[in-house]
Image: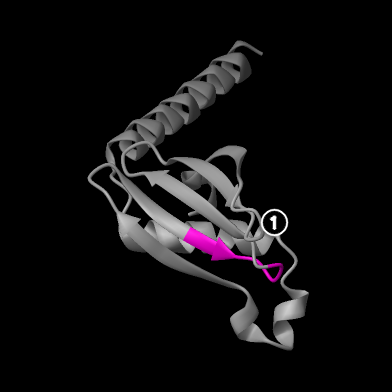
């Protein structure tokens, strides 16, 4: 019985150390432009209905916007004409999401995500 407990503790220690090591590695890795684009594209395909784009593929798309020293700007165009702007922090992956209504040009803060969850 003591051997089983000792083995379980050893396994827990190794697994815990692995995940700590992995999280420390991810904090130091700067997100590339390509990673930001692909992750936002994945987020948009996971969270928006793309079925209407089957008939007209150019009606919905994801494109890169302006790049700054600390963030990438990735833009999603919805079939409604709305633009959803993703501001991806290059170091942390924290991404602000802002939606711009094309009719009244009003911007709405949608919230934040960690883009690393989609890469």
Residue nearest the viewer, comparing 11 with 76? 76
In the rendered image, the vertical position of residue 8 relative to residue 64, given as above or below: above
- Which residue is the site of mark 1? 47
**Coordinates of residue 70 in the picture (x, y in percent):** 27, 41
Along the horizontal axis of the image, is 99 left or right of 95? Answer: right
Residue nearest the viewer, comparing 109 with 21? 109
**Coordinates of residue 25 in the picture (x, y in percent):** 32, 37
**Membership of 93 in magenta stretch:** no
**Coordinates of residue 76 in the picture (x, y in percent):** 55, 63
**Coordinates of residue 30 in the picture (x, y in percent):** 28, 45
Q: Residue at x 65, y 66 (%)?
A: 78
Magenta stretch in the rendered image: 75-80
Along the horizontal axis of the image, is 106 left or right of 54? Answer: left
Q: Quadrant of residue 92?
A: top left
Q: Residue at x 72, y 85 (%)?
A: 54
Query: Helix or strand or loop: what does disc 1 sit on?
Result: helix
Instruction: Give the quadrant of the N terminus.
Output: top right
Q: Rate crowding at label 1 as few (under 14), some (14 to 19) or many (20 or more) other CA atoms within 10 Å.
A: few
**Membership of 79 in magenta stretch:** yes
């Amino acid at each position: 019985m003591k051997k089983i407990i000792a083995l379980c503790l050893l396994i827990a220690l190794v697994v815990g150390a692995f995940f700590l090591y992995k999280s420390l590695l991810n904090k130091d890795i700067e997100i590339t432009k390509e990673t930001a684009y692909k992750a936002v594209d994945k987020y948009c395909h996971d969270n928006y209905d793309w079925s209407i784009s089957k008939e007209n593929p150019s009606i919905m798309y994801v494109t890169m916007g302006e790049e700054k020293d600390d963030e990438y700007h990735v833009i999603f165009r919805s079939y409604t004409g709305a633009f959803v702007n993703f501001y991806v922090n290059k170091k942390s992956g924290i991404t602000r999401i802002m939606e711009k209504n094309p009719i009244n040009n009003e911007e709405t803060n949608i919230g934040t995500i960690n883009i690393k969850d989609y890469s």
